[in-house]
Every structure is written in C-alpha cells, then in structure tokens.
Amino acid sequence: MTEKLPVLREQSLLLDVNRFEHAQRVGNMLTASTMVPEHFRNNIGNCVIALNYADRVGIDPFMAMQKMYVIHGKPAVETQLQIALFNNSSRFTTLKYKMSGAGDKAQCIAYATDKETKEEIEGPPVTIAMAKAEGWYGKKGSKWVTLPDLMLRYRAAAFFIRLYAPETTLGLYTKEEMYDTGEIIDITPAKDVQEEIKENANTETIDIVPEETATVNPEAVEETADEDAKNHGGAGPMSAEEIAQIKAREQAEEEVTDKPGY
C-alpha cells in the first residue's frame, strides 16, 4: 500500500510580498475595467481578495469575479460556480441528482461517487415543502415559484458540497442561499452617498418670489408734513394731551352751536 504524500499548496498571495505587489498591479487594472461587476470597480481591495480567491480555488480570476458578490461584507458565489468547482475536484465524480415526487412533495437529492472508495454518497433531500416551511418559496421575485426544479437542484447541490466538500469553494455560501435566508433583497450595490449628493446637487429649480415693498412718495411725505405744520403752528407732532384738549374744545363748540337761538 502506497503512502499518501501531503499536498503542498502555494502560500496565499496576500501573505507573499512579491505576489501581493503583483496582485495590486493587476487589481488596479481591473478596477478601471467596465467588464467587471460594479462592486469591483474603483475598489482595489475587493479585486485583490477576488484574485486571491481565484488563486486558492484554481480558476481564472476574471471568471471568478463574474460569479462573485459582496453582500454586507460577506463574499458569496453563484451556485453555478460552486457546482463547477466541485465537478473539477479530484475526490468525487460529477454531481448528479435524483428527482422524485410532485407538488409540495417534489424532492431532489444530490449525489456523487467517491473515486477512492467507489461509494455513492447522497446529500440531504430538499423538497418544495421545505422551501415553503423555510420561507424561501414565498419571497417576492423568488425563482422557487417559476423554476422549482432548478432551485431544488441548486439547493441540493449546495447542501451536498457544504457537507462533503467545503474545501472546493472555501466554505462560501451561494448568492441564492443568502437571498433566501434574508441576507439580501437586492444585490445591486447602492450608490456612494457623496456621489449621489454630487449628482443631485443644484438640479431642482426653486422659484423665489421677492416680497413686495411699499413705495414711498417723497412728495406725499412732504405734503403731509406741511399740513401738520399748518394745523399746529409748525410746532411739530402734537402730544396726546394736546389732541385731547382740541377734541374737548371742538365738542364744547358743537354743544353751544346746537343750543336754540344760537
């Protein structure tokens, strides 16, 4: 019986100075590309981490970035990539599926054969009833309603791979799983706040109506001043006491005038 030798893996590019510097140069190029998803543009950190992931799982960096997402700080991959990585592994045969039942009893079991022991290994069964009980089925825009057979296979594959071969994807969850479990509603990255403010600044027109101001006629002011001066001997404005005396005198004169025989 031959003894198995340990598999030596190259050190992560994040921990190797020369490879890390090269990854930064590649990352700078990728951040300026319009062919990478939005969450990698102008973000060299995300790009370098994606390069490291691609290096660790042994796939082309560009294709890895097309199938990767950043959700609340957590990396996730599409189920297609997860299955492809598993099928490229040397431990198992290609993943296959056993479908049975209908309606809520529709069921899928993912299975593969261990190449060394020739043992057929099955993953946990996934059913439509499970999808409804877990709340996956009723979500707005859920593919469980329109593509139930595909979603059964995807979830059965994810369960099998996470249980028997998590090393093939470094244990990452799939985008579809994170959507179903409520981690995300929309995977489209939100706009940067400062960028949104810059775009919307000074775009709304506001009509400012000036308040009406009273127009003062200098001639009318002068006429009023002359009239006051004439009526009161040019002594300026009268006091309250003077006005009361004038009114009392005018009232007394009216009473005398109204007397009979006057």
Image (cartoon, rainbow, N blue to C red):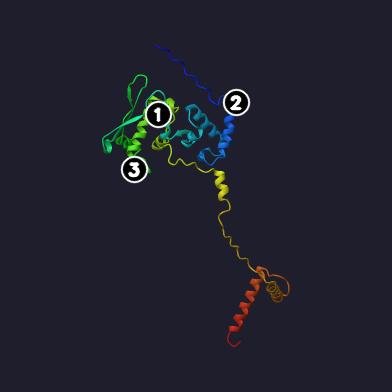
Q: Compare marks 1 and 3 and give the one earlier in the sequence.
A: 1
Is residue 134 at all visible to an observer of this figure?
no
Give the residue displayed 58% in from the left and 48% down from the top: 198
What residue is disc 1 on? 87
Q: Earlier in the sequence, mark 2 or mark 1?
A: 2
Q: Are marks 2 and 3 in contact (CB under 8 Å)?
A: no
- Choose between 142 and 55: the one closer to the eye: 55
Q: Nearer the viewer, residue 225 or 166?
A: 166
Residue name at image x 45 percent, y 33 percent: 76
Judging by the rendered image, the residue that carries numbered circle 3 is 146
Q: Nearer the viewer, residue 66 or 107?
A: 66
Left or right: 252, with 185 as reference point: right
Residue that appears at 34% across and 43% down: 146
What whole-number distance in Å separates the C-alpha atoms at marks 1 and 3?
A: 27 Å
Q: Quadrant of the N terminus?
A: top left
Which residue was labeled with disc 2?
A: 18
Q: Classify mark 1: helix, strand or loop.
A: helix
